[in-house]
């Protein structure tokens, strides 16, 4: 979760694409369209599973950002899946 948040702050679209599960990820060009957001902070609220030996994990977080001059926040519960020795973002609510 934290590495993906950092990738958003750095606008590292290739990393986000690589860590997004192929069954749910958008095209790389669509990810690049999110470049107007400035991410200001991340607070992890809860984590479930996601430990060695687990095949799934869940992270609930709040991220603070601005788009233009308006500060906002996003709270999401993200689902992750472990495949081929790597965690992938699956989806979020």
Image: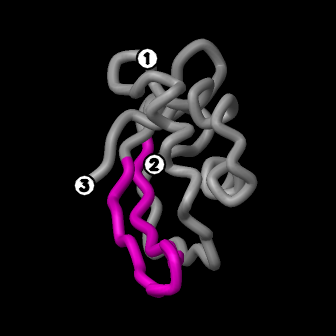
- x then y, percent, for residue 46: 44, 69
SS state under label 3: loop
Q: CA distance from mark 2 to mark 1?
A: 21 Å
Nearest to N terminus: mark 3 or mark 2:
2
Based on the picture, tell me whether residue 48 belongs to the magenta stretch: no
Q: Which residues are magenta?
A: 57-78
The residue wearing badge 3 is: 93
- If the image is split into quadrants, where does the C terminus sit? bottom left
Based on the picture, tell me whether residue 64 belongs to the magenta stretch: yes
Which residue is located at x 52 percent, y 44 percent?
50
Q: Is residue 79 left or right of residue 51?
A: left
Q: Is residue 25 left or right of residue 63?
A: left
SS state under label 2: strand
**The residue positioned farthest toward the top in the image shown:** 84
Q: Would you identify the image quadrant in which residue 62 lies?
A: bottom left
Q: What numbered label is drawn on residue 22?
A: 1
Say whether marks 3 and 1 touch (CB < 8 Å).
Answer: no
- Residue 38 vertical position relative to residue 54 in the rendered view, above or below: below
- Residue 6 vertical position relative to residue 25 in the rendered view, above or below: below
Most common SS among magenta residues:
strand
- Residue 29 vertical position relative to residue 69 in the rendered view, above or below: above
SS state under label 1: loop
The residue wearing badge 2 is: 49
Give 74 or 13, whichever is nearer the viewer: 13
């Amino acid at each position: 979760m934290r590495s993906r948040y950092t990738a958003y702050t750095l606008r590292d679209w290739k990393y986000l694409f690589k860590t997004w599960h192929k069954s749910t990820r958008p095209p790389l060009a669509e990810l690049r369209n999110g470049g107007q957001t400035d991410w200001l902070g991340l607070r992890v609220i809860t984590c479930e599973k996601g430990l060695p030996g687990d095949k799934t994990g869940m992270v609930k977080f709040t991220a603070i950002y601005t788009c233009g001059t308006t500060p906002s926040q996003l709270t999401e519960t993200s689902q992750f899946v472990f495949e081929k020795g790597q965690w992938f973002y699956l989806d979020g609510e």
